[in-house]
Image: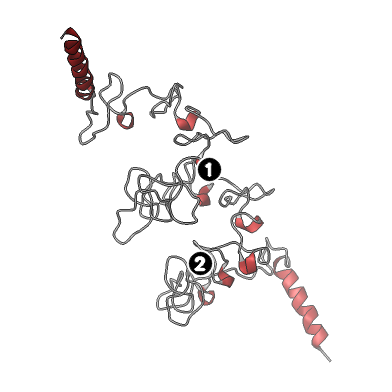
């Protein structure tokens, strides 16, 4: 009988311990949050609980047994030689080197986002809340970069998204820059060069190695070989321009701002050639290397006229 009593007591203690643990687990006090609170703060890591990163000005949570967040060197690091990024999940590598969960779509090796099991291209992660937009949401805004999500460029009057860990967009010096000597353009993809100097993905026409141009959009080809968006007009094979659905001939791209003109704007200007857009002839201008002032122009014209005389 004493043995049976001990057995009953032991069994009861095993059953009640998990219930006590569940009752003692504190939840985050932030309204609507059901995550567990960290330490004596009463909040989860996302809402300020637990140990914080010791980097001045950083409010993120410290990772593991370190005193810094992932961005500032805390937590486990990627074991790939020369890589300083943090290891993802229970793997020993960062996302770029194969760590973390991968996309479950057949043939895709990209990293999975969120709980979907898919990468961003195949619908994983948070999506933009703008109606009919299928792009991924950036930051806590619930919107994609095109609709105002994520960090914005700090250049005055610029509404574009900031690139990488910088405070500016590509046009204003943000993000990685091309390492070609004297080039100030942004580097493309994971390469150290801009498109003009061979950076980014190249066209795979005839298997690759034939066309040196860069790919467009989400395709594997350049514009000349069918890459990028195509014109929405039936039987038209030209590429769509800008954020429009049509080629230049069918009204796509930037249009001339001159009243009543329907032609396309030239280059980085807002007008067509007939209304002053595009690059202009610099012959005879003071700062031009093609003739110096009107005197050079007159001398050249006089010489040409004298040669035409019989």
Cα distance between the residues tagged 2 and 1: 28 Å
Question: Would residue 36 appear left or right of 92 to someone viewing this image?
Answer: left
Q: Give the residue at mark 1.
A: 98
Q: In the displayed structure, would residue 58 be above or below residue 95?
A: above
Q: Quadrant of residue 197?
A: bottom right
- Dot 2 falls on a residue whose secondary structure is loop
In this picture the colour scheme is secondary structure
Q: Residue at x 46, y 40 (%)?
A: 100
Marked residue nearer the N-terminal end (2 or 1) = 1
- Dot 1 falls on a residue whose secondary structure is loop
Q: Residue at x 37, y 52 (%)?
A: 144
Q: Quadrant of the N terminus?
A: top left
Q: Using the image as rendered, state which of residue 5 and residue 100 is in the foreground.
A: 5
Q: Are marks 2 and 1 in contact (CB under 8 Å)?
A: no
In the displayed orientation, state which residue is furthest to the top. Answer: 2
Q: Residue at x 77, y 83 (%)?
A: 305
* Disc 1: CA contacts within 10 A as few (<14), some (14-19) or many (>=20): some
Question: Would residue 228 appear left or right of 57 to someone viewing this image?
Answer: right
Q: Residue at x 54, y 46 (%)?
A: 173
Question: Would residue 117 appear left or right of 82 to someone viewing this image?
Answer: left
Q: Quadrant of the C terminus?
A: bottom right
Q: Quadrant of residue 232?
A: bottom left
Q: Give the residue at mark 2.
A: 228
Label 2 vs label 1, nearer the camera: 1
* Disc 2: CA contacts within 10 A as few (<14), some (14-19) or many (>=20): many
């Amino acid at each position: 009988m004493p043995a049976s009593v001990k057995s009953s007591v032991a069994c009861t203690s095993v059953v009640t311990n998990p219930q006590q643990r569940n009752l003692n687990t504190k939840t985050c006090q932030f309204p609507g949050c059901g995550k567990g609170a960290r330490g004596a703060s009463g909040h989860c890591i996302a809402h300020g609980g637990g140990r914080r990163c010791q980097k001045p000005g950083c409010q993120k949570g410290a990772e593991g047994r370190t005193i810094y967040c992932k961005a500032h060197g805390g937590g486990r690091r990627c074991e790939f030689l020369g890589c300083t990024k943090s290891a993802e999940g229970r793997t020993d590598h960062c996302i770029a080197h194969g760590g973390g969960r991968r996309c479950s779509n057949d043939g895709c090796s990209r990293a999975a986002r969120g709980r979907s099991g898919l990468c961003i291209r195949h619908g994983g992660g948070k999506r933009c809340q703008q109606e009919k937009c299928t792009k991924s949401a950036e930051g806590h805004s619930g919107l994609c970069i095109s609709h105002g999500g994520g960090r914005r460029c700090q250049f005055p009057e610029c509404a574009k998204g900031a690139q990488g860990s910088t405070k500016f967009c590509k046009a204003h010096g943000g993000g990685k820059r091309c390492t070609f000597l004297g080039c100030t353009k942004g580097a493309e993809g994971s390469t150290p060069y801009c498109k003009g100097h061979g950076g980014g993905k190249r066209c795979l026409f005839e298997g690759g190695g034939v066309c040196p141009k860069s790919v467009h959009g989400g395709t594997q080809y350049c514009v000349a070989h069918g890459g990028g968006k195509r014109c929405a007009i039936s039987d038209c094979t030209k590429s769509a321009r800008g954020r429009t659905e049509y080629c230049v001939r069918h009204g796509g791209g930037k249009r001339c701002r001159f009243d009543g003109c329907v032609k396309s704007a030239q280059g980085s200007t807002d007008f067509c050639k007939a209304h002053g857009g595009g690059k202009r002839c610099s012959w005879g201008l003071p700062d031009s290397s093609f003739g110096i002032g009107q005197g050079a122009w007159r001398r050249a014209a006089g010489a040409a006229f004298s040669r035409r005389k019989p």
